[in-house]
Amino acid sequence: MITTNKLATTALAVLAVLLILPMTGCFYAKQALSKSPGGNMYSDDSYTYISTPYEPLTVTLYDNRDNEPIWTVDVPIGSKVSLRFRKNKIKEGTARRPDIMEWVIYDQKKRTARYENSMAVPSPESRMMRVSLRKGPEFPEEAPEEQMFPNPDHQWLPVEPKQYRTDSNNNPSTSYSGN
């Protein structure tokens, strides 16, 4: 039979472990749950690249067997591209390209996004990713503000003056009587 003292001690020990575990530094939740240039803090073969005005990036994936570029993207300024490689997906890939690469381009202020695109790629020993800088600086194209001009054919109506309370002599009232 477990005594209340033993139960309280066990509960306190479990609570202490649960409070100390996040402070150990082994697992940084924000980094693991978001796609950032530093990676996910574990080996999952995913990469994220952010393009800024002073570092406009182009990401290219090459097949090392014939040095042929398979895929390339000019990452738009203010955006990031996230890539993930899934190994040995023979059903979706081919014998020459057994792995699948998934990617998405999205706003750099967002933490994460679903992978929207995929394609078959060579195995890790047969592929190489090159990240290069484009000539810069580049600035994002901003849409000009839409200007609203009044319609010259519009019939403008005069504004009626405000009406104030007046007393019996048509003078503005200085006190409110509640009537």
Image (cartoon, rainbow, N blue to C red):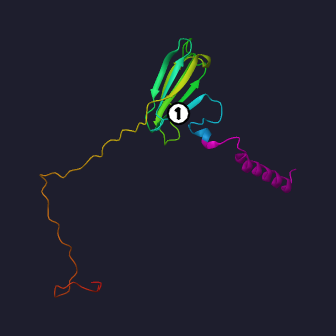
x 32%, y 41%: residue:
143
Residue lying furthest right: 1
Q: Tell me, yes or no, if residue 138 can be seen here.
A: yes
Number of marks in the image? 1
x 56%, y 21%: residue:
128
Element under label 1? strand
Magenta span: 1-30
Left or right: residue 60 versus residue 20 is left
Left or right: residue 178 versus residue 32 is left
Q: Which one is nearer the viewer's eye here, 156 or 147? A: 147
Q: Tell me, yes or no, if residue 92 can be seen here.
A: no
Q: Which one is nearer the viewer's eye here, 29 or 79? A: 79
x 30%, y 43%: residue:
144
> Could you tell me which quadrant the C terminus lies in?
bottom left
Q: Position of residue 57 (x, y in %)?
A: 48, 31
Residue lying furthest bottom: 169
Dominant secondary structure (helix, strand or loop) of the stretch shown in magenta: helix
Q: Which one is nearer the viewer's eye here, 80 or 120? A: 80
Q: Taking 29 as reference, is 87 above or below it?
A: above
Q: Residues within 10 Å of mark 1 (few under 14, many from 20)?
A: many
x 50%, y 23%: residue:
60
Q: Which one is nearer the viewer's eye here, 138 or 74? A: 138
Q: Where is residue 19 in the image (x, y as percent from the top left)?
A: 72, 50
Left or right: residue 94 versus residue 13 is left
Question: Which residue carries the number 1 mark?
Answer: 49
> Residue 166 in magenta?
no
Q: Please state which amino acid type lies under the numbered disc 1.
A: Tyr
Q: Where is residue 151 in the image (x, y as percent from the top left)?
A: 16, 51
Q: Position of residue 119 (x, y in %)?
A: 50, 21
